[in-house]
Amino acid sequence: MRIAQVPPLKKTAGMPERAMEEKKSNDIGRLRRSQLTKAAYKVVSRKGYYNFTIKDIAKEAGLSAGLVHYYFKDKQDLLLNLLKEINVNIKTFLNRELCRLENPLDKLNAYMAQAFGLVEKEKDYFYVLIDFWTQVNRNNRMRQANIKLFQSYRDECAKILKEGVEKGVFVEMDVQYTATIIISLIQGTIVQYVIDKSAFDYNRYVEKTKEQIIKMILTTTM
């Protein structure tokens, strides 16, 4: 997760001095929150959900513990923000890829490539996510955040499937059910590999899984 630098404010004609100061303060606030969220991502991936402190986050970010508490009321608030930002970053990258494509099959392949590719591009992502899953039966806010996360996975996949059906590229199907199956195949493969990297050849299984998904939904054989 890259952090954008806050550019120096240029005085805009007609903008009151107070408004300029508020904007500067808001920009710095966004930067600090992003900085702390990035630090939390690194710390949680190393230490796990249960074994880190606010001081660990502050040290990683190079800021004071008091500043962490200024922007986030507690550890849970910080972690919920982390989960939200992870989701936003993934969706932003995916949408950037999809907007360049027109064929629903190409879009589905891009979707699967991005999902499976997270194992290498964001090696800590699933360690963090698995840690968050341990909280869903104890923490309703964390449960709701995870519900939204998985719903967003299904929604993005379902959107591609729906377009494919409408254009006659994919077979008629229960779009929501098929999206759920696809997410299950992708996530299940990834989680098994993250837990035990010696269990199977990840790249070979990824290709076989993608082929199986395409075969399941395509109107004609490839």
Image (cartoon, rainbow, N blue to C red):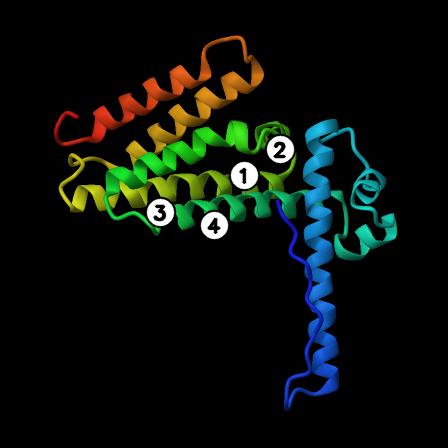
Query: Can residue 48 be seen?
Result: no
Of tags 3 and 2, the one toward the viewer is 3
Of tags 1 and 4, the one toward the viewer is 4
* Quarter of the rendering occupied by the N terminus: top right
Find numbered disc 1 in the image and state the secondary structure of the residue it sits on.
helix
Between discs 3 and 2, the one toward the N terminus: 3
| 98 vs 217: above or below | below
Q: Are marks 1 and 3 in contact (CB under 8 Å)?
A: no
Q: Amino acid at mark 1?
A: Asn
| 197 vs 1: above or below | above
How busy is the neighbourhood of tag 2: few (under 14 within 10 Å), some, or many (20 plus)? many
Q: Are marks 2 and 1 in contact (CB under 8 Å)?
A: yes
Task: Tell me how far mark 1 sits from mark 4, CA to CA.
Answer: 18 Å
Between discs 1 and 4, the one toward the N terminus: 4
Between discs 1 and 3, the one toward the N terminus: 3
> What residue is shown with label 4?
92
Query: Can residue 142 be seen?
Result: yes
> What residue is shown with label 3?
98
Q: Amino acid at mark 2?
A: Phe
How busy is the neighbourhood of tag 3: few (under 14 within 10 Å), some, or many (20 plus)? some
> What residue is shown with label 2?
132
Q: Going by the image, does 191 lie left or right of 136?
A: left
